[in-house]
Image: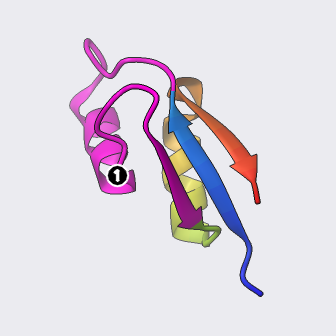
Amino acid sequence: MAKSIQVKLVRSPIGRPEKHRKVLQALGLTRLNKTVNLHATPAVAGAVKKVIHMVEVKEL
């Protein structure tokens, strides 16, 4: 069974660098308090690491 993570956007991307906003969009986080379930792959882990100060992460 593949591991997955739940990522929730808790800080606004307004005023953040364009790279951070693009990473959030790629993760599917378009609104505050939106939650997405993603497979825990190295690519997803790296993307989450770039915006860890703006999201909450739970392992499922």
Quadrant containing the N terminus is bottom right
Residue under pointer 1: 28
Quadrant containing the C terminus is bottom right
Is residue 11 found inside the magenta-colored segment of the image?
yes
Query: Is 1 situated above or below 32?
Result: below
Q: Which residues are magenta?
A: 10-38
Instruction: Judge left or right: residue 5 versus residue 55.
Output: right
In which image quadrant can residue 57 be found?
top right
Tell me the residue at 46%/28% (across/down). Answer: 33
- What is the number of callouts on the image? 1
Helix, strand or loop under label 1 = loop
Query: Is 60 situated above or below 15?
Result: below
Tell me the residue at 49%/35% (across/down). Answer: 51
For the residue marked with disc 1, what is the amino acid?
A: Gly
Instruction: Judge left or right: residue 34 versus residue 5.
Output: left
Mark 1 closeness class: few <14, some 14–19, many ≥20 residues within 10 Å: some
Tell me the residue at 28%/35% (across/down). Answer: 21
Please provide percent x and percent y for residue 44: 53, 62
Please provide percent x and percent y for residue 29: 36, 43
Please provide percent x and percent y for residue 38: 54, 64
